[in-house]
Every structure is written in C-alpha cells, then in structure tokens.
Amino acid sequence: MKAEFEGRLLIEVPKDTPKIGFLEGDFGREFLAEYNGRASKYGNNSSLGVLSIQDGLVKGSNPFTVVLANEVLAKEKLRTATQADLEKALKLRVLELRGTYEDTGLVLRSEGNPNSYLARDLTKQLRARNIKFEYPVLLNLTDLSLKVDQDSDYGLAFNLKDEAVPVYVPVLNSLNGSRFNFSDVNEATGLPQQLKKEGERYLFTRNSGLSRLYLDGDLNLDSYNDLFDSSNSGGRIVVVSGLATQKFSE
C-alpha cells in the first residue's frame, strides 16, 4: 500500500516536553532587554556587555554572560544548555551547532594560573561545603551565580549555587589535542569517556588553573581557553526547557 496509516497516539504525551533552541525573535529581544537591565547590578561590567541582536538572533557568549542569562531565564523556568544537552541535540539533529560556539562550564584543575584568583575562590567555596572533590572539576554554568569582586581581574567572580554539583572528570586532564568520536560521549556529562589517536573530534585541555568549557564551531570540545571576557558574533546562548537531560535513547 502506498498510503500511510494515520492513527492516534497510544501514549500519554508529557505536559513538560523538552525543548532546546537559540535566543531569537521576540523572545530573544525581550531577553536581551531584561539582561541588559540586570547587568546594571554588576556595574555594567564590560564582560557582560557583549551580547547583541543580529539577524534576529542573540549573538555573543562568555562564561559571565551565560551565568547572567540564567538569572534572567530562571523567571521563565528555563535555563542554558549544559554540555550534555548540546550533545543530545547533536545526536538527535535538532539544532545546527556547527559554525558557532557555546559556553557550558568551567574546568577547575588547580588553584594556580590561569585565572588563579577565581580558581582559589571557587576551591575555597567547595571546601567550605565539606565537599570531597578531586581535580579536575567540571562546574556547569547553570550551577553558578555572579558577584561583583574588584579583586578579580574581570571585576566579577562566581558563587556556587546551593544546589551546585561539581563533577570529577579525569578526562579533562588528558593530553591536549586528544581525539574522540561522537559515540565516545558520556551522556551524563557530555564529555568523552575515552580518547583515541584517531577520531572525528578533538578535546583541547590544559593542566592547571581555571578555564572555560565550550563546544567550538567544528564541534570540538575546548577546555583550554582562559579568557573569560572574550566573546564574538559566533557565540550562541542555547536555552532548554523541560526534561532536556533525559538519556539520549529516551
């Protein structure tokens, strides 16, 4: 038969359907207006003033902007994407991420450079909570809030939220430029479980201090970059709603 059977769903459709997307259209414009208003709480720090609307999309990204974005999005019961969310989007092919970059976390490897002041501050906060942890630690940007700190090179620093869950990810101390495939990704963290001499993607690392974690325009994972105020028009803030971090197979 050439015609397809058209029946009715025999499952209960979840009320809270997971969604993922960029900040765009009217929602993007309203978001940016609210974001810029909240930036005044932080002295209109230049690290925050890097977002703009271009071609109907909010463009630009660095760790500080993503943390402030979560402050805005929380009112709408939304949040920014973790690396696990982005990997799920890639697997399901629901969002085109090639050619852009997305900040998702910080990687804490030691109290030294780069960003030693911020590294020491975050380590102190972790220890104050009697959290047993080992370096390297992945801190999702969704687990952080901002504070003004004139002793920081950026004039800003991070607070751990009460619900923050630091993740020990030893692969982040691997040799810089190691490779992996899409199939090697741990769905819980969005990071590779194993590395190879050959592979479709690269993992960029360093061995100390505090650095960014982001998905780059070639779909590689970069945890080497230490410039927290750097942003360009290739940056995107990805937003998720619902149970977006269910297992890939669900």
Image (spheres, helix red, strand yellow):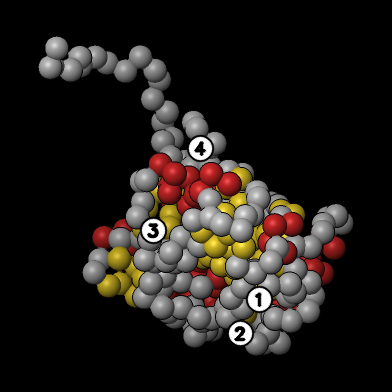
Please give the label number shown on residue 157.
1
Compute the Cα span from label 3 to label 4: 17 Å
On the image, numbered disc 2 is attached to which residue? 154
- If you read the primary sequence from the N terminus, does the residue marked by circle 4 or circle 1 appear first? 1
Mark 4 sits on what residue? 248
Q: Position of residue 52 (x, y in %)?
A: 34, 75
Query: Could you tell me how far apart the alpha carbons at marks 1 and 3 are, in whole angstroms?
Result: 28 Å
Q: Secondary structure at mark 4?
A: loop
Which residue, as the protein is rendered here, is positioned at the far front?
197
Query: What amino acid is at disc 4?
Result: Phe
Instruction: Residue under label 3, please give it.
Output: 97
The numbered mark, 3 or 2, whose residue comes first in the sequence reads 3
Q: Residue at x 35, y 14 (%)?
A: 10
**Disc 4 versus disc 1: nearer the observer:** 4
Q: Which residue is outermost to the top?
A: 1
Residue at the location (32% across, 18% down)? Answer: 9
What SS does tag 1 mark? strand
Where residue 117 appears, x then y in whole percent? 74, 81
Eyeballing the image, is 250 above or below 136? above
Q: Residues within 10 Å of mark 2 (few under 14, many from 20)?
A: some
Residue kind at label 2, given as amino acid type: Tyr
Residue 211's place in the image compared with 23, above or below, is below
